[in-house]
Image (spheres, helix red, strand yellow):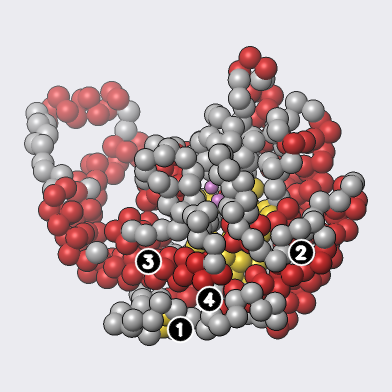
Amino acid sequence: MTGYFNGIPAIRYEGPESENDFAFRHYNPDEVVAGRRMEDHLRFAVAYWHSFAWPGGDPFGGQTFERPWFGDTMEHARLKADAAFEMFDILGVPYFCFHDADVRPEAGSFAASLKQFEAIVDHFGAKMQTHRARLLWSTANLFSHRRFMAGAATNPDPEVFAWSAATVKACMDATHRLGGQNYVLWGGREGYETLLNTDLGRERHQAGRFLQMVVDYKHRIGFKGTILIEPKPQEPSKHQYDYDVATVYGFLKDFGLEQEVKVNIEQGHAILAGHSFEHEIALAASLGIFGSIDMNRNDYQSGWDTDQFPDSVPEMARAYYEILRAGGFTTGGTNFDAKLRRQSLDPEDLILAHVGAMDICARALKAAAALLQDGALERARAERYAGWDRPEAKSMLATGTLESISARVLESGLDPKPRSGCQERLENLWNRFV
Ligand code: XLS
Ligand code: NI
Ligand code: NI
């Protein structure tokens, strides 16, 4: 025991009337919603980086947090892991996620860093024998160190490409070894800062080849999890090659990977791309590449990926509605890629941030499930497209040509009548459930 969370009890479901801060009001893991236990629907994960590695800095100021595990030694890294697993137990979350750089100190050479990483992965393996949390995904941090300042796979320097490939191999090995459900690639620096020094065709090709190597290696080692790309339009670089779901799909098609790779969609990234979270989820589902979500929220005033814990049931309900419509998660889950505000110094803050977020998601899930079960929204949607069920409409879409369609229009005297989209009526229906 590290003692860090001393005095904080394991969080239990006490129902909406509870006055206990350290209790769930809505998240009840065993409660069955739409035929599945809540825990199995939501598949919550804690993000190691924000909760255990982030020091509380912002662009104008440095560290605000004091954690006994901050430091560069392996002893610190083990203490951090021990505290992390204690928090996973307190919250009862089934999963966690990490980057290599979150969990081990960097050493003087690639080989020495790898050795330290493998030692921590062993430590995780041992912890997982006696604790419940499992690995939702891991990923390589190919953006913090200065060697990645011009990109990882898309770097003009092939040696950085090589370093990155070797790093991803190590992280995939760790994920496989720990029984991870997915492997994530987020390309924070896989974009550029100025076109004046950038060959974007070349960089995009490098990124495509890199991903092909990842998929190839996955099959070679027999990793059964899902490879996920996490789209983001910009920040820290601009014009990222994985801008949004649609861009990623085009990229996957280009490199023949659309059957191999899915997406991990983050709320804040969707907003930065000028979309809504639910749009990105619905689009991914319709393209057959929906995988997992990073749950957070942006400050809508700042235009920056502020990674706050979610606080809006109506917004999250839209997201879970699309997830449920898509059939729910398979290997994916709800990863809290969210961090405390830098004034939230106490161990209690870390726990309560997750408790509140888990409750928000649970309420959103229940509302979405009730609406889906009610069926009125889906009936209205089906009704809107009912014309396409008619045989002449079906054959037009399947085999029509402009000439054949034009001939039919002329001879039938067809005259389409505009119909209401009923948006306000559907919004009212939505609001009866949320
Ligand atoms: C940053 C990303 C990052 C990924 C993992 O904006 O959200 O945290 O989820 O590298
Ligand atoms: Ni993010
Ligand atoms: Ni993320």
- Give the residue number, with chain letter if any, for mark 1: 12
x and y, in percent, of residue 389 in the image: 24, 50
- Give the residue number, with chain letter if any, for mark 4: 91
Q: Earlier in the sequence, mark 4 or mark 3?
A: 4
Q: Earlier in the sequence, mark 1 or mark 3?
A: 1
The three-letter amino acid code for the residue at tag 3 is Ile
Circle 2: is it few (<14), some (14-19), or many (20+) Cα within 10 Å?
many
The three-letter amino acid code for the residue at tag 1 is Arg
Q: Is residue 25 above or below residue 59?
A: below
Q: Is residue 247 above or below residue 139?
A: above
Q: Earlier in the sequence, mark 1 or mark 2?
A: 1
Circle 4: is it few (<14), some (14-19), or many (20+) Cα within 10 Å?
many
Picture residue at 22% right of the left edge, 69% below the top: 374
Image quarter of the C terminus: bottom left
- Give the residue number, with chain letter if any, for mark 3: 360
The three-letter amino acid code for the residue at tag 2 is Ala
Q: Quadrant of residue 203?
A: top right
Picture residue at 71% right of the left edge, 60% below the top: 70
* Residue 77: image tag: 2
Q: Tag 3's secondary structure?
A: helix
Per the model, the C-alpha gap separating discs 4 and 2 is 21 Å
